[in-house]
Image (cartoon, helix red, strand yellow):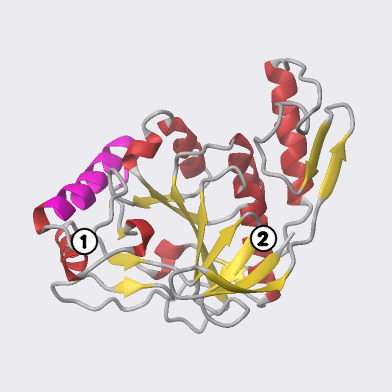
Amino acid sequence: MRGRSRASDNGTPVMALVALTTMVVALAGDGVVLAGRRLGEGSATGPPGASTVEASPSADVERQSALTASYINHIPRFAPQPTPQPMALPSGLLAPQLSRVPTTQPVAFVTIDDGWTKVPEAVELIRAARLPVALFLEVNAVRDNPSYFTALQDHGADIEAHTKTHPNLAGRSYEFQRDEICGSTDQLAGMYGRRPSLFRPPFGDLDSTTLRVARDCGLRAVVLWKETVRSGVVHFQEGDHIVAGDIILVHFRTTIIEDLVAALQAIAAAGLVPARLTDYVR
């Protein structure tokens, strides 16, 4: 379930390297077929064109469990995580900017952005895989169902800041950026009982004011990324494999399960293990 392409620094693919291996799973009794399409597309109980049957809540839970189990079978087995060696963060008026953690340990970091699309199966997969993740949440995206992210937090996810309304920040005033960054940090702390320590600017769009505001808001670092995953395909900014310390960007989309499995397979292919970002940047 893994594909690769090389991408430029802004994440735009420039050359496809490996085609995504198509996974087709038919789950008997449910009429559910996964054939390289996005979860959530088509009817609730089958692919586009299939007849629709209203499912009971218990049947829906069973369907979710079966879907997740089919993906769990594609999750690599990893060696035990090493004892974390936190990086020494620089002091100063500006928060440090990271897309790769400077470490020689064989680790990589999975992060998930936004929060608009809330696929129930993703919670089950993250729990079953014991996957350490950092969630960079947009406040407006989580308001309709904050408990979805509480469930992820209960399984060990760290909730970090990603602004209130997801604007481009570069070139905006100090006051505007402070409202978006400090405001999101304050609100997420109130919602989830832990104050975020890391910040990711929407679209990776930032300037020196962003770094200053992040520091003033008490955030330890501004986090970017080296790889992105879209529709089950890993896109690289540099080279064709994940490097120790790389930060990987996934989004809360309908394809999140495929994307997480693709990220984990790429981590395994590089001889690395997934680790908790806040264990290394603290």
Which label belongs to residue 262? 2
Sequence order check, earlier mark of 1 and 2: 1
Query: Which quadrant holds residue 70?
Result: top right
- Establish if 163 lies above or below 20: above
Query: Given the image, on which type of amino acid does mark 1 rest?
Result: Ala
Mark 1 neighbour density, 10 Å: few (under 14) some (14–19) many (20 or more): many
Q: Is residue 193 magenta?
A: yes
**Residues at badges 1 and 2 in contact (C-beta under 8 Å)?**
no
Residue bounds of the magenta highlight:
176-194
Query: Given the image, on which type of amino acid does mark 2 rest?
Result: Ala
Q: Is residue 46 magenta?
A: no
In this rendering, position of residue 54 left or right of residue 24: left
Residue depicted at x 54% and y 79%: 244
- Image coords of residue 63 (percent x, y): 75, 30
Residue depicted at x 49% and y 41%: 154
Mark yes or no: residue 79 visible.
no
- Establish if 152 lies above or below 282: above
